[in-house]
Image: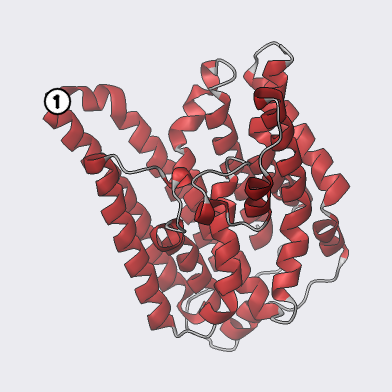
Amino acid sequence: MEKWSALAGLRFLLASVVAVAHLAEYSPLGAWAVIPRFGAFEAVLGFLLISGYSIASSYAKEPEGYLWRRIKRIYPIYLASMLLAGLVYVLDEGTWPSAWTILGNVLFLNQLLTQTSLVGPAWSLSLEFWLYCLAPFLFTLRDGQLRWLVLASFGAYVFYTCGRTLFHWRYYSGLGYGLNLPLLSFIWLAGFRIAKTPEKALSALKAVGVILALHVMLEVAIQLAHLWKHGQLDTFLRADATTYVLRSIGLGGVWWVFFRSLKNSAGSAKPVRWMRALGDISYPLYLIHIPVYALLKRNEVTPSPLLYFGMAVLVSWLLYRGLDFYSQRRHLRVPLPDKAVLATSAQPGTGSGA
């Protein structure tokens, strides 16, 4: 399968996990309840991995005008999602958010100057935007330097995750002072490294697999310690094991899609249009599902996971068709040669496949 089609379909699946996880607050999930058990946070990690890989690939192909391309891609949908979230805020609070709040969110300073985002899921988009701005600098670093940045950030993440359990520190969506940058950039940088050094892509991807495995092991260890402290260790297999198995499967699936994409990236597979289409609406779906659910519930629409999620997908498609002109034009352009592929094909025997 063509690489970017596979990653586009993966983005939609990850956005759906997050959207259904939040749906539990607005509608009984029924059989859908298994979906959030794959982990909304794990889905965010998958998003960040894909984002880092995509940004490095984009910058490698065409450094000139890179940041302006990013702005044209993200801002129309983001501003529309802010307007929709602001409408829900007005209906709940009777007034618009303060000008300071709006300005901070528009400039992606929401997790730097505040501890919340007007568009709830945009806390991770704020982190991505800071990394977008750092990408030209990061591209000048050697692979060893990038590897150490990944390890330093992951070490900070492990430390903070333990602190969340021991000292009840805030979850990442509620952090201010830009702390998400050192704590969560490890997975974005790992994806960036894969695309930046195609001759070492599979080696870098193996490191990603180790990081994702350690993440799950850390979560399991913390939960086991919590249950042991409260004398409930016998409940782990009955109440928690399935959740961690599903999270492992989800993250393993992300890793496997990357692995297959890298192995087949030098092939001549054609884009899969329906998967590309799902990828296109994953970005608005990630941002607007909560206000869509809130408006449906406020208008007393019968709670139904299929109906609520379906409406979120429909609104996402309408926003894509109405506002994301950059992506629509991009599909019409003749693709440039993939420098990552060219670099690999010029070095036979590397085995990176990227």
Question: Measured from the top left, where is residue 299 in percent x and y?
Answer: 74, 15
Residue nearest the viewer, comparing 161 with 31: 161
> Total marks drawn?
1
* Residue sitting at x 60%, y 62%: 129
Question: Can see residue 261?
Answer: no
Question: Measured from the top left, where is residue 8 in percent x and y?
Answer: 66, 52
> Is the C terminus in the top left, top right, bottom left or bottom right quadrant?
bottom right
Question: Measured from the top left, where is residue 64 in percent x and y?
Answer: 73, 82
* Residue sitting at x 50%, y 61%: 259
Question: Measured from the top left, where is residue 84 in percent x and y?
Answer: 74, 36
In the rendered view, tell whether residue 307 sits above or below residue 325.
Answer: above
Q: How is the image coloured?
A: secondary structure
Q: Residue furthest bottom?
A: 346
Query: Which amino acid type corresponds to the residue marked 1 in the rendered image?
Result: His
* Residue sitting at x 39%, y 58%: 183
Please name the residue that numbered disc 1 is placed on: 230
